Amino acid sequence: MAQNDPELTKAIEQLFTVVGGAPVPADIAALTILIENNAYDAGVANNKAESYQPNFQKLDYVDFNRIGPHVPAARRMQWNDDDGTIDVGLNADVVLQVGQEMQFYAKNTSGGAIDNGSPVMFTGTVGASGKLTFSKAVADGSITSLYMMGVATEDIPNNGFGYITSFGKVRGFDTSGAPYSETWVDGDIIYFSPTVAGGWTNVLPVAPNLDLPVAVVLNAATGGSGSIFVRMNTGQYLTSLHDVEALSPSNGMVLIYDAAQTRWEANTITAGANIVITNTAGNILVATTGASGSFTAASGETITVISGIITSIV
């Protein structure tokens, strides 16, 4: 029992007040509250002494109310019956669903505000703070897919910090497709837009644009009632596969397997006698030159060549 405890003093004074006569219910209720409060405070003090930690409570478990009222707030935990998990309030606008979402806390250094629901990419770090910086995602192939980061899950001002979702739901923005002159429906796969930095499209991008099937539309809606589910996928490049060696590809190269190295290698086709090979962008031209006569193909056909030109196949 704590010494010089003002709450205990109040309880004892109340007891002395009512002991001379029959206590009324209000007196009993007030006395009970004072005694319970003192017991609670004593328990807190005991727990502090045992743990050597301020504001520490030893608990076997915590049961959350299944049904609200639930009011989201920073640093508040409560049960989310709809998603079947605990909600953790990260700030006034962002709630983390435990076990169902993954998020980064990073700094917007893009030079302008980034809206909730915007695709973003990693751009660097904030000194030795351990935090990342980001800007609107550029998916036209000029930036490697390795830098693609996730989706802003709140409005983040320039030079402000905010949360980026790499896995989980992002809610509260227009998912109708109208901002990009498209029409989206529930279940649409959407990609980082190759034409609008920080934008979306439901049209499959083609190379060299980045093909990033990042999210699915959960609720196609206008205004602030739309939602998506993000599953960040940065895709792959052929040159980054473990069994491919193609560091400096050039026009006309093909992949040839090297059994000794146990890998595929980028190389050009070697020209032989009376054979000319011309490598161009997306094309390999094979021609004969300087030879005349007839040749028998493996199928038994006779190929006639005059001055390096095939004149007949019989």
Image: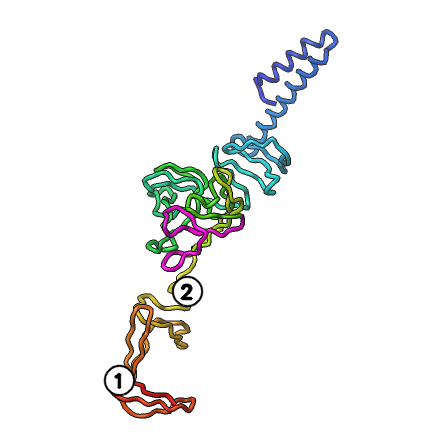
Q: Which residue type carries mark 1?
A: Thr
* Residue at (72, 14) in percent of width and height: 25
Per the picture, the main secondary structure of the magenta-coloured stretch is loop
- The earlier-in-sequence mark between 1 and 2 is 2
Quadrant for the C terminus in the image: bottom left
**In this picture, which residue range is highlighted in magenta?**
186-210
Q: Position of residue 159 (x, y in %)?
A: 34, 37
Q: Is residue 56 above or below residue 187?
A: above
Q: Is residue 309 above or below residue 78?
A: below
Q: Is residue 292 left or right of residue 51?
A: left
Which residue is more in the foreground, 209 or 34?
Answer: 209
Residue identified by numbered label 1? 289
Residue identified by numbered label 2? 241
**Within 10 angstroms of label 2, few (less than 14), some, or many (20 or more) residues?**
few
Which residue is more in the foreground, 8 or 154?
Answer: 154
* Residue at (48, 33) in percent of width and height: 92
Which residue is more in the foreground, 294 or 77?
Answer: 294
* Residue at (35, 71) in percent of width and height: 266
Q: Position of residue 1 (x, y in %)?
A: 61, 23
Q: Position of residue 301 (x, y in %)?
A: 40, 90
Q: Secondary structure at mark 2?
A: loop
